[in-house]
Image: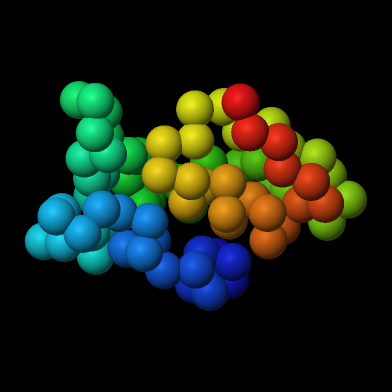
Amino acid sequence: MTAMARLPRHEFVQFEFSAVRVCQYSAPIGSKRRSRSHFIGRLMTDLLDVKADDSVLEIVTGLGYQAAILAQLARKVSLR
């Protein structure tokens, strides 16, 4: 939760979706895709229980927000 509080999610959402970007819901990210909701991201991060010496693989990063959060928690984050 601390890592998510330090990194504002709305900075990862395209400006044209500004009405959506600060809310807790999923947001459009192009190519008919949507980001996951803020709640789901928090839940997934909590359930991962990432430690400082962990390496994490983030697949289909979407906005990059989750990868940025994980980078604050883990030793290494790889993107695919």
Residue in front for this viewpoint, 45 or 7? 7
Quarter of the picture holding the C terminus: top right
Query: Is residue 73 at least partly visible in the picture?
Result: yes
User: In the current view of this chain or complex, which residue is farthest to the left?
Assistant: 19
Residue in front for this viewpoint, 15 or 10? 15
Residue ID at (47%, 51%): 65
Residue ID at (27%, 39%): 29
Where residue 59 appears, x then y in whole percent?
Answer: 57, 27
Residue 62 shown left or right of residue 66 in the figure: left
For residue 54, which quarter of the picture? top right
Residue ID at (79%, 46%): 76
Where residue 11 appears, x then y in whole percent?
Answer: 36, 64
With respect to residue 58, does 47 lie above or below? below
Where residue 14 appears, x then y in whole percent?
Answer: 25, 53
Residue ID at (64%, 51%): 70
For residue 13, which quarter of the picture? bottom left
With respect to residue 72, does 79 lie above or below? above
